[in-house]
Image (cartoon, coloured by chain):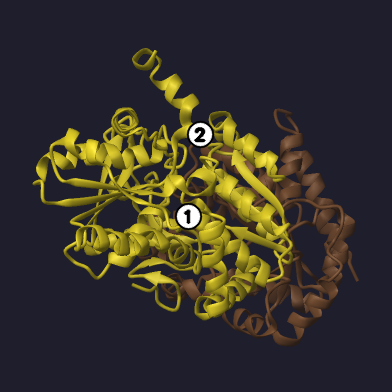
Chain colours: A brown, B yellow
Amino acid sequence: MNRIDKRLNELRKEGKKAFIAYITCGYPNLKLTESLMIELSRAGVDMIEMGMPFSDPMADGITIQMSSQAALKNKITLTKVFSLARRLRAKIEAPLILFTYYNPIYHMGIAKIGKRLLSSGIDGLIVPDLLPEEAGGLKSELKKYNLDLIYLAAPTTKTSRMKKIAQQSKGFIYYISRTGITGARKDISSDIEYNMDRIKRIAKKPVVVGFGISNPAQAAQIARISDGVVVGSAIVNQIKKNLGKPNLVKKVGEFVGELVKAAKEAR
Amino acid sequence: MQPDKQGYFGRFGGKFIPETLTTVLKELGAEYSHARKDKIFQKELSCYLNEYAGRPTPLYYAARFSKFLKGPKIYLKREDLCHTGAHKINNTLGQVLLARRMKKQRIIAETGAGQHGVATATAAAMFGLKCVVYMGVKDIERQALNVFRMKLLGAELRPVTSGSQTLKDACNEAIRDWVTNVKDTYYVIGSVVGPHPYPMMVRDFQTVIGKETRVQILKKEGRLPDYLVACVGGGSNSIGLFHPFFNDKKVKFAGIEAAGFGIKTSKHAATLIKGSIGVLHGAKSYLLQDKDGQINIAHSLAPGLDYPGVGPEHSYYKEIGRARYLAVTDKQALAGLKLLSEVEGIIPALESAHAIAYVQKLAPQLTKNKIVVVCLSGRGDKDIDIVQKANLKRFN
């Protein structure tokens, strides 16, 4: 059992929902990413998605694109993200999930990636442009090291395909709340309850929901019908809003703290 | 050569896309495989190609150009004479007909040089569909004429300000739109790139170029050509010319990439010559990328060539040695453009001028009895501003 499974098991026993925070590594710089991740952990986040920027993030909206571009200007690389994870592993307990597009991973070499993830203390991987059909080599590589390759499911995913994804996704299933790209939204998609019901009938694994969740009320709404909530763009927006301010880390921590509270107290 | 079931040409191709798009791509694949065999669809398409787009295009014997180069007989496949001024219309008519079959009301496209945007806007206008075109702001500046044409055709132009502000980022933006509006939107991809089935489908729509060439050259010369030459950005005009000759091993293929300032500099778009294998915009193929797998910005004076990727079928042709890929610089392309204009009275698009410039290099190595066919993928009107700016001293 790896850290992700362990954490999800504990939450299930406590009858609580998972709160997962996404953060773009290297935005505004690596040092702040490190402080922010420690603060997120302190704020009660159950898992952290470490976003490794890609030059062409086609599944991302303007917020993640902007932060990715800024991080790439800061010369962020996968190797630097691995070192960051290694440093953090000694300081925080939360499972770490690497979120990146396929090309940086492919370029580093599929045969190397499992070992590097493991030695960095990263527990799982989300690749938004990698379907189970194309994941063969990476899947077996991660399996060797008991690391989770987490697949996404979408509102457009047909039920037969949903079964396949539910079966093959490790750790949990990442359900995309609506058709579209990442980014904070005012409204939650109206078909989400129907779709969650559809997945829950199929999947025995936990299902967490992401894309578009931006405030405590939405986090609570999603937590009620799922096993967990992912928030990304709204957190990156908070970082952007507080850029240059001495209390940036604290402010972001407070914002995330409220989201965590809302998700945890949702009944 | 057909891709396998997963959409691979050898080890190139596939589907690397967000999960949200899997259903629509599957539907598209199914619809296209019906349409491909459907005689009514094919008849309808060929009717529009003939009556609306102006096909077949001539295979013109460029006697003065041949004489000037003191080499082989050079024929120009005149895609520049197609409606809207480039080969792009072959593909957009095909795809918009498919969109209509799939009952999609909204068409989106990305464009670099603007030719694909104009061709998509044209096909959408003719069938009364709403059309949105994504274009990088740098390309909007460079291709003012085509921007105006798209607007006249009733398309909505959305400027792209992210990243390199050229074709690569227009593609990202179009994909984002598609993921968001997947239910009613059809994405007309402009080259033999993207996830399966696009590289195969766009290729099929463009093979009209090669199929006509085969018939025409057999009629004129009684034999197949020795060389086929075409420029390669994403690679649609070249694959359209090459593909019908794939099994004719004696026919040599030369794909000409943009060397920009030179392939030894960082400012070029020679993906197959200088790139490495990776995944971009839905497919595994050669790419211009850095040591960390981040995509590099391509450069070419020709907006239609400055794309850091290339169609997976080309990567396969390179790997098996079926085609040779070479590159010519901005400067050489400009000289080619000037030469063809002067000796044949044809102003080629800057993209096609790369193929012309390569023929200038190739011709002296060949004897007079050899036959070379060059795809003149588009006409040069759209590039007049660039050409003037790039070479004011020489032309004024």
Earlier-in-chain disc, 1 versus 2: 1
Residue assigned mark 2: B382
The residue drawn where x is 65% and y is 66% is B99
The quarter of the rendered structure image containing the C terminus of chain B is top left
Nearer to the camera, B305 or B365: B365
The residue drawn where x is 57% and y is 56% is B52
Residue B130 x %, y %: 73, 54
Q: Is residue B330 above or below residue B218?
A: above
CB-based contact (under 8 Å), mark 1 and mark 2: no
Q: Residues within 10 Å of mark 2 (few under 14, many from 20)?
A: many
Q: Chain of mark 2?
A: B
Residue assigned mark 1: B191
Q: Amino acid at mark 1?
A: Ser
Q: Is residue B181 left or right of residue B229?
A: right
Q: Chain of mark 1?
A: B
Residue B150 x %, y %: 64, 41
Q: Amino acid at mark 2?
A: Lys
Kindly identify which numbered label has been placed on residue A228. none
Q: CA distance from mark 1 to mark 2?
A: 19 Å
Nearer to the camera, A82 or B107: B107
Mark in front: 1 vs 2: 2
Specify whether residue B44 is in view.
yes
Q: Is residue A76 above or below residue B314?
A: above
Which quadrant would residue A106 be assigned to in this image?
bottom left
The residue drawn where x is 11% and y is 46% is B366
